[in-house]
């Protein structure tokens, strides 16, 4: 499993710790960063979402899902793509990790810019802070690259993954740079790496390679982004590959309902004014154009 995943994502020399979910992957990544540095503070980003377990939910910028027991971790939330704000927090000391999504999904599809990730990588290395790339939603081809951070050319200390990894079967993973020594007993999981989960994950990688699904996401993402930007009524189109956010000036609930009722198209949402598009990586050009034409028709409807 580790060899197959390493070859697919270009991180062949990274170790792989297998677990059961994205939240568990982030928990272990944060723990590993603290073990490695001997420090405890974390820098995360406004509107971030990293999971619903203890440290992962503490690093999520949403007080509604944080219970009292989740507030033991000290986390500083700074704006995405603001390197100066990260530097200012690191200067305060005791920072073990910066955790950032390759593309913020729950927040409404906000891309971590390549120049920002490059600067973040330099800053973390010079400050002996661990850089964790959360690719749980944006990974596994979703962005048109295996991992969304790839266009930046960096190699993070740790990469977490899940969601697309098992195509619906519960599995997560932590890719760990060879710079780290994860000692025996430092990380653990009851069901992580079980045979059935690994068989599902290997099957996913084989299908992705055979059907060239990463390339398909890149090509059709380009088609969708280019044509959606031409439609009147959409304030902003943002994203990469098949991870696209459509921002409107008004609540999108009526539009989403019309897409379902009239065209049987299901979409995601962020806050009240953003439609999130995360179609299957097996999307065809005909399907993409059906969506574009359906949305166009609805936007022209008085």
Image (cartoon, rainbow, N blue to C red):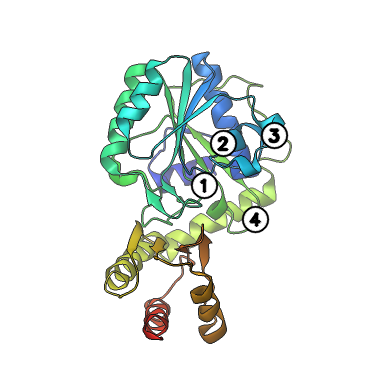
Q: Position of residue 254 (x, y in %)?
A: 52, 75
Residue most extreme to the right: 190
Q: Secondary structure at mark 3?
A: loop
Instruction: Name the residue carrying label 3.
Output: 189
27 shown above or below 62: above
Can the viewer see residue 18? no
Which quadrant of the structure image shows residue 292?
Answer: bottom left
Give whichever of discs 3 and 4 has the lower sequence position.
4
- The label number, if any, that marks residue 169 in the structure image: 4
Give whichever of discs 2 and 3 has the lower sequence position.
2
Q: Nearer the viewer, mark 2 or mark 3?
A: 2
Give whichever of discs 1 and 3 has the lower sequence position.
1
Q: Position of residue 168 (x, y in %)?
A: 62, 58
Can the viewer see residue 225? yes
297 shown above or below 201: below
Instruction: Name the residue carrying label 1.
Output: 136
Instruction: Name the residue carrying label 2.
Output: 26
Residue under the image location 50 percent in, 26 percent down = 42
Residue under the image location 37 percent in, 66 percent down = 216
- What whole-number distance in Å separates the C-alpha atoms at marks 2 and 3? 13 Å
- What whole-number distance in Å separates the C-alpha atoms at marks 2 and 4? 18 Å
Counting every numbered tag in the picture gives 4
Crowding at dot 2, Cα within 10 Å, few <14 / some 14-19 / many 20+, comes out as many
Q: Is residue 25 toward the left or the right of residue 132 in the image?
A: right
Question: Which quadrant is home to the N terminus?
Answer: top right
Which quadrant of the structure image shows residue 228?
Answer: bottom left
Q: Position of residue 188 (x, y in %)?
A: 67, 29
43 shown above or below 135: above
């Amino acid at each position: 499993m580790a060899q197959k995943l390493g070859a697919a994502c270009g991180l062949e020399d990274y170790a792989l710790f297998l677990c059961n979910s994205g939240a568990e992957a982030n928990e272990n990544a944060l723990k590993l960063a603290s073990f490695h540095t001997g420090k405890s503070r974390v820098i995360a980003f406004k509107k971030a979402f990293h999971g619903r377990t203890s440290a992962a939910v503490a690093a999520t910028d949403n007080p509604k899902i944080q219970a009292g027991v989740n507030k033991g971790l000290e986390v500083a939330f700074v704006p995405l793509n603001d390197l100066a704000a990260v530097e200012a927090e690191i200067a305060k000391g005791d920072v073990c990790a910066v955790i950032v999504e390759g593309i913020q999904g729950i927040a409404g599809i906000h891309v971590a810019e390549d120049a920002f990730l490059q600067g973040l990588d330099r800053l973390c290395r010079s400050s002996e802070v661990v850089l964790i790339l959360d690719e749980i939603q944006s990974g596994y081809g979703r962005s048109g690259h295996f991992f969304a951070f790839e266009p930046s050319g960096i190699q993070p200390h740790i990469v977490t993954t899940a969601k697309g990894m098992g195509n619906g079967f519960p599995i997560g993973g932590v890719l760990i740079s060879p710079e780290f020594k994860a000692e025996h007993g430092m990380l653990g999981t009851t069901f992580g790496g079980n045979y059935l989960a690994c068989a599902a994950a290997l099957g996913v990688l084989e299908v992705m390679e055979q059907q060239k699904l990463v390339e398909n996401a890149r090509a059709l993402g380009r088609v969708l982004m280019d044509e959606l930007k031409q439609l009147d009524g959409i304030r902003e189109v943002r994203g990469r590959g098949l991870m696209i956010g459509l921002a409107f000036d008004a609540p999108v609930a009526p539009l989403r309902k019309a897409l379902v009722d009239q065209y049987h198209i299901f979409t995601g949402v962020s806050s009240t004014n953003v439609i999130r598009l995360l179609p299957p990586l097996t999307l065809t050009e005909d399907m993409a154009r059906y969506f574009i034409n359906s949305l166009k028709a609805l936007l022209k409807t008085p």
